[in-house]
Image (spheres, rainbow, N blue to C red):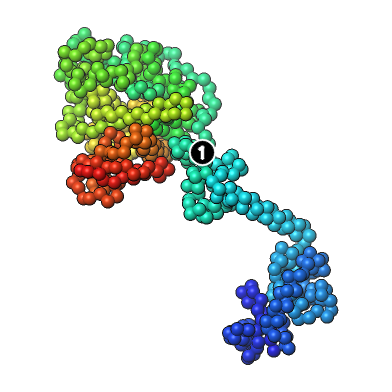
Amino acid sequence: MNVFYEEDGHFKVATIKDEQQASLMVEDQRGKRSKIKSANVLLRFDRIGLEEFISAAEAAAAEIDTDFLWECCGADEFGFQDIALEYFGKAATPQQQAAAAIGLHAAPMYFYRKGRGRYKAAPEENLKAAKAGLERKQREAEQMAAWQAELAARKLPQAFAPQLNRLLFRPDKNSIEWKALAAAADAAQLSPLRLLERVGAIPSVERYFFDEFQHEYFPKGLDFPSFPELAAPADLPVANVRGFSIDDATTTEIDDAFSLVQLPNGNWQVGIHIAAPVLGIAPGTPLDQVILDRLSTVYMPGNKITMLPDAAVEVFTLQEGAARPALSMYLEVNAGYEILSHRSVIECVPIVANLRHDQIEPLFNEETAGRADTPDFEWKDELTWLWRFAGELEGRRGKAENQIQRLDYSFYIDRDGPSEVVRIVPRKRGAPMDKLVAELMILVNSQWGKNLRDAQVAGIYRAQVAGRVRMTTQPGQHIGLGVECYAWSSSPLRRAVDFVNQTQLIALLRNEKPRFQKNDAELYSIISNFDTAYAAYADFQDKMERYWCLRYIEQENLRELSASVIKENLVRIEGMPLVVRVGGLPELPAGTNIKLQRLAIDYLDLQLELRMATL
């Protein structure tokens, strides 16, 4: 006796060798024996060979008109043998009965399985929906095949163009566009990103990096919400000083300025003036929320994403030509550069000059600063006095001795239509103007931090006691700077932390209730969000600087590069802030100068392939 049975979703035939109450020992047409459950048997037959039976059943199943078979079924549950008699007639052979079982099993869209060998016809509405879905899948499969062919031919499908950002940055892996792209990438043995690059979907790597960053950190876009027109407070006293700022030529958010006045007693009044957007941006307003969302201006060579909209910056930036609202700290300093007293006021400060590095540095630099025999220029006396004062401040912090002189680099991207020219300008860290600004900023941030601490007003501090610098609501030492207390307060147009601290300082000066109280949950939230965003923004800036370094190498056709060994195979390229690893580099002492040959540049991976030329 032979059996037709179902096992693991497949139909099989075999000859019975032994039979127990609940199981059978059977042998298939290849002679393989196995044990099966009696419940799995659908039909028993004899006098027909196994191969002949299954071949006839499968052939008959292939000829079944599934739609007609479905029409033969009623609304009730049925067995496969019942429908075989309806479809093939009352004389349906065992092979035809097996064919019905195979046909029913192969059409789950038409027939719902209700048990072994038992089914129920799908309702008409369900069947129509399922057929429509199948037709859609077939159309989609055909469309995906066409797209894959285009991608293989290094052509970007037209349908991909409006969805490129989604495919690049936020792909829906269930979409047919992504499935076609992924399949084509697998066939080409490339990543989807590399395949899109190959078909011309990434014409600008710079733009790709920018869009990638925007999708991650500014998913709602870069536009600012609408906000009421801002105006500077009209009731502030105007300071009797001539303020001037010192910034890079590209700076528009001018946060800080200085003034210097000799007092009747022979001492000097040093003014440190910080832009005061807090005076025009109230808590809970749209711009206040923007600050807490963006948290900082994002910098990159040739571009930036400002924390505040231009219309707000223009009201509060310390632009020359008008008296600007400011939070000012005045110091009385004697001839020995000792600070005798300090006071802070809210006022308007006349800004008479915005000095720019490229204009002043040729006149005021390491060679000329402090020398009497150099040509005169406007602001020379003020810059010289403040620079000497800065040197004293640096020494008192214990930071003037044994400083390693390093280079900083400024990037400038000169754009003329589609062409871009990269300029990388080195500037020695600790140059006179840098030291002047840095020391006065450290001083004002330290003193205002102490003011908040002493008044027991909540603030956000930067502390370094053991290891890394961290943001905290608890005042503490900053060992790296050599100060007992430090709170960022000098860049409120560019950093949310400074804006928060300025909010607290202005409340303190006005003797008002501060916006944030100690242990305020919102303050902790701001710190956490700021730390995360500020680190991400810095990483993005580093990434873009690396990109423009590679562009500069190609632009200048630098085939041989000078470098110095940092450690192992890590080297620093001369003339730019670029650190790379060099494969096959022999073990050399740190600081060894070497020559490297350029082999290849990969902009998407930001890789520079080099090999050693000579020592």
Counting from the top left corner in percent of width and height, residue 164 is at 55, 41
Q: Determine if residue 504 is in view.
A: no
Locate residue 299: give its quadrant: top left
**Is residue 327 in sight in this rendering?**
yes
Is residue 155 placed above or below 342 in the rendered structure? below
Mark count = 1
Report the front residue among 69 and 190.
190
Q: Is residue 279 left or right of residue 597?
A: right
- Residue at position x 32%, y 10% in the image: 240
Neighbor class of circle 1 (other Cα within 10 Å; few <14, some 14-19, many 20+) is few
Q: Give the residue drawn at x 40%, y 14%.
A: 236
Spot occupied by residue 539 in the image (x, y as percentages of width and height): 37, 40
Report whether 308 appears left or right of 69. left
Q: For mark 1, what is the residue?
A: 219
Quadrant (top left/top right/bottom left/bottom right) for the N terminus: bottom right
Q: Nearer the viewer, residue 302 or 271?
A: 302
SS type, badge 1 = loop
Q: Nearer the viewer, residue 571 or 21?
A: 571
Q: Tell me residue 516's x, y (percent).
A: 41, 32
Tell whether 160 sits left or right of 441. Answer: right
Q: Is residue 79 above or below residue 259?
A: below
- Type of the residue with mark 1: Pro
Residue, x 50% and y 32% (percent of image)?
222
Is the residue 372 above or below the residue 104 in the image? above
Say whether residue 534 is left or right of residue 9. Answer: left
